[in-house]
Amino acid sequence: MILAANFKTNHTRKSTAAYLEALELFLDASPAGCDIRVYPPLSALLRADLYSHTKIGAQNFYPAIEGAYTGEVGAAQLNEFDIKNVLIGHSERRALLKETQEFIAQKFAFAATQGWEIIYCIGEPKDVRDSGFEAVAEYLWGEFDGIDISYDKLAVAYEPIWAIGTGVSAEVQDIAKVLDMLKDKLKDTPLLYGGSVNADNLSSIISLKSCDGALIGGAALDVANFCKLIQIAQK
Ligand code: PGA
């Protein structure tokens, strides 16, 4: 089971340090028995090797070791923090930062050469969802163009775009249908759900047979809330 907190553009270095300290104390007292990951903003990265229960990951990177990529962060910069896991393909980067499938595939291939763990995000917009399951399936498989699904450090997060940050999660039976379809092809790759996960819906989502965890935004911003979600997963 993977529970991952995506901070997006929230928290500072100071508040991230306090968050991780509280999270580690909580996990010291009650080990999660699952894979806990936190993705702070790049400016708030802390040395991943200082934390024993939590993996710290990068929300973004440029697919190069270093070089002339103004404003970007490459492997040399992430290595300094011992970061070994990354998010790729989040819908906010696809939509707001105009990352194309081709560029996303480049990032994926680069991350794989670095041996990083990857949470690869996919998800359909509302109009596709409204067109029915076949349309959703076709859209989602399109987001695997150029992606090596046999990469062994891969987890896939299914995050319907219309469910992200809206407070409206997808219906559990719809999540089940998509995750079962993905599991059929992706076999042993862990599958996460993301999109308005909270303390009320987490349990029914992670109980699904093809669900191996959750990628959580808003409900994980407060460390006490994230600990509560971990407690729910522990049950
Ligand atoms: P949310 O975000 O939990 O706030 O909907 C999830 C995500 O974007 O990963």
Image: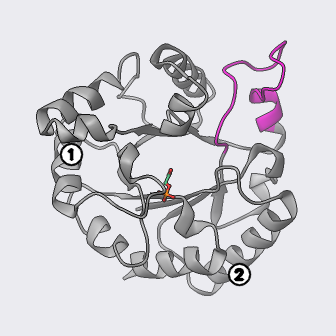
The crowd level at tag 2 (other Cα within 10 Å; few <14, some 14-19, many 20+) is: few
State yes or no: residue 70 in magenta. Answer: yes
Residue 155 location, quadrant: top left
State whether the magenta stretch is mostly helix, strand or loop: loop
Q: Nearer the viewer, residue 112 or 225?
A: 225
Can residue 159 be seen here? The reply is no
Is residue 195 something one can see in this rendering?
A: yes
Q: Earlier in the sequence, mark 2 or mark 1?
A: 2
Q: Secondary structure at mark 2?
A: helix
**Is 175 drawn above or below residue 127 in the view shown?**
below
Given this view, does label 2 or label 1 mark the residue nearer the observer?
1
Please state, as top left, top right, bottom left or bottom right, where the C terminus lies in the image: bottom left
Point out residue 76 in the picture as x, y percentages from the top left corner. 81, 28
Residue 9 drawn at (x, y percent): 70, 50
The residue lying at 34 percent from left, 61 percent from top is: 169
**Viewer-nearest residue: 152 or 145:** 145
Q: Is residue 55 left or right of residue 145?
A: right
Q: Amino acid at mark 2?
A: Leu
Q: CA distance from mark 2 to mark 1?
A: 36 Å
Picture disc at residue 25? 2
**Residue at mark 1: C-beta within 8 A of ligand 1:** no
Which span of residues is magenta-colored? 58-79
Residue 54, quarter of the rendered image: bottom right
| Residue 197 image point, x, y percent | 41, 65
Find numbered disc 1 in the image and state the secondary structure of the residue it sits on: helix
Disc 1: which residue: 178
Residue for point 87% across, 64% down: 14
Left or right: 173 with respect to 64?
A: left
